[in-house]
Amino acid sequence: MLHLRRISPIGCRNPIFWDAFRAFSSTTDQSSIRKAVASILDSLSLKPGGTLVLNHGDSDVGKSLIQLAKERKLRSISIIDDKPGNPETIEELKALGGDIIVPLSYTKTWYMKRLVSELSPIAGINLGEGYQATAVWQGRG
């Protein structure tokens, strides 16, 4: 089952954390996933030009999120697991509209902290397991 674990709005000094467990159907029907992801983005009221951080960008939900973010003129920073085949995965996600795709190990570097401080993400979306998106934007300043 695919699900959204946490939506973390950014943009204030002490952001409010919302635990938003929204179950997607166990089907991998792209249309259903896309509608669910669109409703999540709608609920965040993100403005064009903003940046969002997400983990598991290479999942079906992550790919839909990347595509919808690009359509809405949002920048995305996608975090993917460290694994063989990352260069191919990165190229695939860029072809879908991903702006910045980084392996998990990169998120722990000062380069990432600098990148995040320059782009000032307004939302962190953790898909599946892990809180990498939250950790990245918490270290942004």
Image: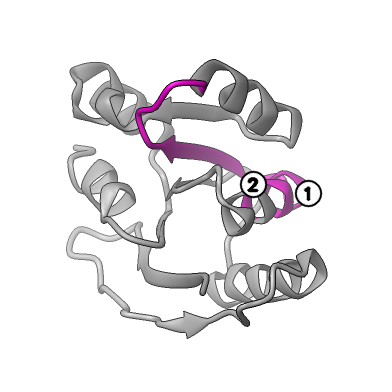
Q: Earlier in the sequence, mark 2 or mark 1?
A: 2
Q: Residue at x 35, y 57 (%)?
A: 11
Numbered-mark total: 2
How far apart are labels 2 and 1 at the CA level?
9 Å
Q: Nearer the viewer, residue 88 or 75?
A: 88
What's the residue at 64%, 33% (across, down)? 93
Pick the residue in front: 115 or 132: 132
Residue situated in front as seen by the camera: 30 or 12: 30
Q: Quadrant of residue 106?
A: top left
Q: Which mark is residue 66?
A: 2
Query: Which residue is drawn at the image coordinates 35% and 28% (left, top)?
Result: 82
Give the residues in magenta.
65-85
Q: From the viewer's perspective, is the residue at label 2 or at label 1 nearer?
A: 2
Is 58 in the magenta?
no
Most foreground residue, 95 or 13? 95
Residue 108's x, y, as percent?
A: 19, 28
- Give the side of residue 134 with respect to residue 30, left or right: left
Q: Which residue type carries mark 2? A: Ile
**Callout 1: helix, strand or loop?**
helix
Residue at the spot 35% in from the left edge and 58% down from the top edge: 10
Q: Which mark is residue 71?
A: 1
